[in-house]
Amino acid sequence: MIKMYGISTCTTVGKAQKWLKENGVEFEFYNYKEKKPDPKKIDEWFAKFGWEKMLKKNGTTWRELDPKLKADMNEVKARKLMLEHHNLIQRPITETGKETLFRFDEDEFRKALS
């Protein structure tokens, strides 16, 4: 079963879900607002994509963080922040069973899920 992780109000997540539905792909959605992400998943995604790529710095949550928390960012600090503020995780992350897709790219989804 395809698993998608994200936040239901995210427009990029919405586009990815719409694509999956239109293409008849069944999936389970894990909403960070309802259930915090598993720390082991964060570690897996860091290993695959790198913490720098995973950390969402272009949103309100990042802008509103205390500058002291954002200073001298590293993997340990990023992981802790993402577990406390799940809006800081780039999304969606989609696990197909064979590969893990980062964010939403229609061509990548088509290749991986067709």
Image (cartoon, rainbow, N blue to C red):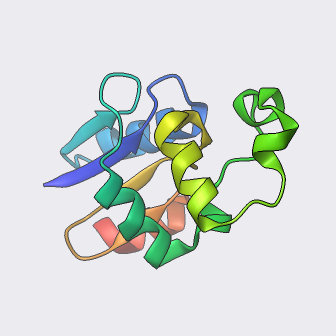
Place of residue 8 in the rendered image (x, y in percent of width and height, measured from the top left): 44, 26
- Residue 39 vertical placement versus 31 (above, below): below
Q: Is residue 49 left or right of residue 23?
A: right
Quarter assignment of residue 5? top left
Name above or below for residue 102 compared with residue 104. Answer: below
Extreme residue toward the left, this view: 1
Vertical placement of 110 versus 80: above or below?
below
In the rendered image, is residue 104 in sight? no
**Which residue: 39% across, 32% down?**
32
- Does residue 103 appear in this view? yes
Residue closer to the observer: 58 or 66: 66
Residue pictured at 41% horizontal, 58% vertical: 42
Q: Is residue 57 left or right of residue 22?
A: right
How many numbered tags mark residues here?
A: 0
Q: Residue at x 59, y 31 (%)?
A: 11
Residue furthest to the front in view is 68
> Quarter of the image containing the C terminus?
bottom left
Give 17 or 66, whichever is nearer the viewer.
66
Q: In the picture, residue 100 is in which quadrant? A: bottom left
Choose top left, top right, bottom left or bottom right for residue 73: bottom right
| Picture quarter with the N terminus | bottom left
Q: Is residue 107 left or right of residue 41?
A: right
Residue at 62 percent across and 55 percent down: it is 77
Residue 111 place in picture, x, y as percent: 39, 74
> What is the x, y in percent for residue 3?
25, 50
**Is 37 in front, or is 29?**
37
